[in-house]
Amino acid sequence: MRFIPIFAALAVANAKLLIDYRGGDPVSKLGTVDMEHQNLGDHVAAGTGGSNVFIKPENDSKLGVPCLHYKRAPHYRRAEVKNLQHNTLSANKKYFIGYTLRLSHARSGLVIFQWKKQDKDAAPKQNIPFHLEFEGANKLTLGYTTPGSNGSNRTAIWDGTFSTGSSMDNVHKIGLAIDTASDCNGKLELWLDGKKEFSRSNLCTWTGDTYPKWGMYRGEAAAGDDSDPAGHTFNSYVYRVQFSDSSKAEVAESAGW
Ligand SMILES: *[C@@H]1O[C@H](CO)[C@@H](O)[C@H](O)[C@H]1NC(C)=O
Ligand SMILES: *[C@@H]1O[C@H](CO)[C@@H](O)[C@H](O)[C@H]1NC(C)=O
Ligand SMILES: *[C@@H]1O[C@H](CO)[C@@H](O)[C@H](O)[C@H]1NC(C)=O
């Protein structure tokens, strides 16, 4: 009698998450590092950015737990990890993402997640179908791109409070459920710290090959502007990331739902 539930539990544990990242794991378990200096295309190879820009597993010194530490000095525009590229994902599927993290601080323009189209010029143009971006120090938004024109017609379709700082209260769990139904019949749902915050259908979540990116993008200081170095220095501590193509339950630990 007891063997059956044990076997079932094992079966769940073995269900194949596409990504199952735990703080302290090598970054390759989350994906490929993508870092850039001030200008677009000015890449910094992993491990060569010194203390200015890096993404590395370490123990979060404030909370004493293993994390993936992302750091960006004022004149770096990108420190991200991308994965599931090149037709790994597809239309007419349901994907579930959990993302547990803490940020030292944030400011308008800082992006912490992108659902990114592989070919931003593929018609209908929709460079970043949706993303999570700060509009203020503690206000996170869900930005949506209406396909067409130059592919960058973005609108915030949700916003909520997302605290930043150095305590456990600043650790947040983000849950995303993405339905990639074709013909712009997709659905997007968002949870923050276990609370359902947003749900909308008839969205264009898939207009061509698309993949996820976790990290820190934009919000950098303008070239030559050294007036507020602390305000443009960012640290993100990522404790858990999970990505499932089969069930919400599989990513519960990181999504908090
Ligand atoms: C974190 O600390 C633990 C215990 O002190 C140690 O075993 C582990 O190697 C550290 N991890 C990293 C990534 O430094
Ligand atoms: C796209 O067009 C809008 C105006 O319609 C403009 O503000 C924006 O800078 C353009 N973006 C790109 C990437 O060309
Ligand atoms: C931009 O998107 C809004 C909806 O968010 C839409 O009303 C508007 O027509 C779009 N503009 C262009 C140029 O596509």
Image (cartoon, rainbow, N blue to C red):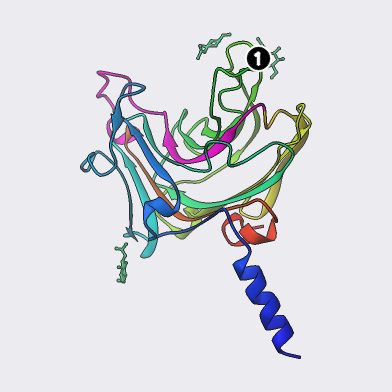
Q: Quadrant of the C terminus?
A: bottom right
- Provide the residue span drawn in magenta: 207-231
Is residue 223 magenta-colored? yes
Seen at 22% across and 43% down, the residue is 51
Residue topped by disc 1: 148
Q: Position of residue 100 (x, y in %)?
A: 52, 54
Within 10 Å of disc 1 (Cα), the crowding (few <14, some 14-19, many 20+) is: few
Residue 165: percent from left, percent from top = 41, 49
| Quadrant of the image containing the N terminus | bottom right
* 5 relative position to 106: left or right: right
Can you see residue 37?
no
Residue 244 visible in the current orientation: yes
Residue 160 lies in the magenta-colored region: no
Residue 64 quadrant:
bottom left
Residue located farthest toward the front when viewing the structure as drawn: 87
Q: Position of residue 121 (x, y in %)?
A: 55, 17
